[in-house]
Amino acid sequence: MRLFTDVPTRVLALYAHPDDADIACGGTLATWAARGAHVVLVTVCDGAKGTRDPQRDSRELAEVRHHELRVAASQLGVAEVLSLGRADGEALNDDALRRDIVALVRRIRPDVVLGPDPTATFFGSVYVNHRDHRETGWAVLDAVAPAAAMPLYFPDAGEPHEVGTVLLSGTHEADVVVNIVDALDAKCKAVLAHTSQISGDHLDVRDVVEDRAAETGRLVSVAAGEAFRELRLFG
């Protein structure tokens, strides 16, 4: 395990649901944005099924969650927020999603792409990683390596672009940690912006976020961190 100290110029974070990035890498995005990086956050799904209430109107919930996403992104200093509008539970690593991601990579031209690790399925005996997360992760990897860099893949989706580094969150094989000590408060505020997804006391949520960041930071002797599996693809 080592400290990841690079500060990219352009960043693309691509996750399944409106609150995923804030939980997984909000501190990293805020840290880099504060240091001048142009950060773009993209969600694949609309969040319309993110409730246990059978009476909740899904269209209204999607609107609420998109608003929460924009509020959270403003806390992190994200420059642009986009949604690909797939229905919750229907993310699929198919040509359509890969083409959308390739087009984004070629337009934004990021140095670093962040997304969920699709190989992480079981977390002990208490959690199975959401199918949307896994499908999104595979689509990100397939779009970046090698499609976005190769001109004959989706030739109508823009000029090819090679992504140098991919950081995968929610992984069982983390090998780098980003120091987020200066952005921990921003991460907490971003997570708490997703009020439709929070049950219980906001102070409890903040405690969980801070405790996890402290635990991760200890791996590399910093006060707060976020861990990733690093892939160096080009350059």
Image (cartoon, grey):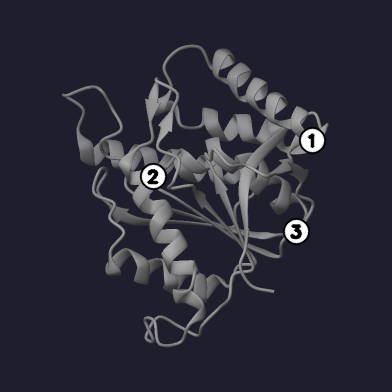
Q: Nearer the viewer, residue 114 or 68?
A: 114
| Element carrying mark 1 | helix
Give the residue type that dot 3 points to: Gly
Say whether disc 2 or disc 1 marks the residue closer to the N-terminus: 2
Residue 19 locus on image (x, y percent) = 46, 38
Query: Which residue is painted at 31% across and 59% down in the image?
Result: 93
- Is residue 160 positioned above or below 166 on the image? below
Q: Quadrant of residue 74?
A: top right
- In this rendering, the label closer to the viewer, 1 or 3: 1
- Is residue 200 positioned above or below 89 on the image? above
Residue 187 locus on image (x, y percent) = 63, 35
Give the residue type that dot 2 points to: His
Mark 2 Cα-neighbour bin, 10 Å: few <14, some 14–19, many ≥20: many
Q: Which residue is mark 1?
A: 220
Gap between marks 2 and 1, in whole Å? Answer: 27 Å
Say whether disc 1 or disc 3 marks the residue closer to the N-terminus: 3
Mark 1 Cα-neighbour bin, 10 Å: few <14, some 14–19, many ≥20: some
Residue 81 locus on image (x, y percent) = 49, 55
| Element carrying mark 2 | helix
- In this rendering, the label closer to the viewer, 2 or 1: 1
Query: Which residue is painted at 35% across and 37% down in the image?
Result: 130
- Is residue 52 positioned above or below 59 on the image? above
Q: Are marks 2 and 3 in contact (CB under 8 Å)?
A: no
- In this rendering, the label closer to the viewer, 2 or 3: 2
Gap between marks 1 and 3, in whole Å? Answer: 24 Å
Q: Which residue is mark 3?
A: 36
Q: Quadrant of residue 48?
A: top left
| Element carrying mark 3 | loop
Instruction: Tell me the number on the disc at residue 133.
Output: 2
